[in-house]
């Protein structure tokens, strides 16, 4: 019986391993990105208090598709200044790109508590409508009541039409 388990475990171990050559291959795009990522991280390590270096790194990592690295840098900025609505908004955008709707909503809500503006609320309403959340209409009504600008009124009207179709 013990030999049977040993054979099964050995078979699973062999089946799960990739050839060493295949594991070491890196695509040409990734090879080209590595020096830029390394340069950005070295600059941040050299000047850890520089928010502008972190913001530049976030943009670089985002454009290269390295969203976990970008998220880590945003988290560092938020640790230093948790009441900066722009950092929370950027974190929400990254969560959106990662497909984490609830994480994005949480970030947008926090950002709109710090700096209430209709753009953030409309972003949150859009995500909530995608989730078919009942509080979407309440949020749209709040935007409609607080901001009487024609631009936002048209967005709210369009969102309400879209929400009623769901």
Image (cartoon, helix red, strand yellow):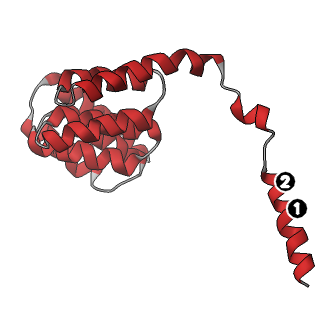
The correct choice, above or below, for 13 with respect to 101 in the image is: below
The correct choice, above or below, for 28 with respect to 50 in the image is: above
Label ID, residue 11: 1
Residue 67, quarter of picture? top left
In this rendering, position of residue 148 left or right of residue 103: left
In this rendering, position of residue 82 left or right of residue 89: left
Mark 2 Cα-neighbour bin, 10 Å: few <14, some 14–19, many ≥20: few
Q: CA distance from mark 2 to mark 1?
A: 6 Å
Residue 24: x and y in percent read: 70, 31
Residue 13, quarter of picture? bottom right
Residue 17: x and y in percent read: 78, 49
The correct choice, above or below, for 38 with respect to 98 in the image is: above
Label 2 with label 1: CB-CB less than 8 Å: yes
Residue 143: x and y in percent read: 15, 39
* SS under mark 1: helix
Mark 1 Cα-neighbour bin, 10 Å: few <14, some 14–19, many ≥20: few
Camera-side residue of 144 and 15: 15
């Amino acid at each position: 019986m013990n030999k049977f388990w040993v054979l099964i475990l050995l078979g699973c171990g062999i089946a799960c391993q990739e050839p060493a050559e295949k594991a070491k291959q890196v695509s040409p795009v990734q090879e080209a990105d590595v020096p830029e990522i390394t340069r950005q991280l070295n600059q941040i390590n050299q000047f850890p208090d520089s928010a502008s270096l972190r913001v530049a790194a976030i943009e670089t990592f985002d454009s290269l598709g390295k969203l976990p690295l970008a998220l880590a840098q945003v988290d560092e900025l938020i640790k230093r200044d948790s009441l900066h609505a722009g950092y929370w908004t950027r974190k929400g955008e990254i969560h959106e790109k990662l497909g984490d709707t609830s994480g994005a909503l949480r970030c947008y809500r926090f950002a709109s508590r710090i700096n209430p503006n209709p753009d953030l609320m409309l972003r949150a309403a859009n995500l909530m409508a995608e989730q078919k959340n009942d509080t979407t209409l309440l949020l749209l009504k709040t935007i409609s009541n607080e901001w009487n600008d024609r631009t936002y009124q048209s967005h709210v009207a369009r969102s309400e039409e879209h929400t009623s179709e769901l």
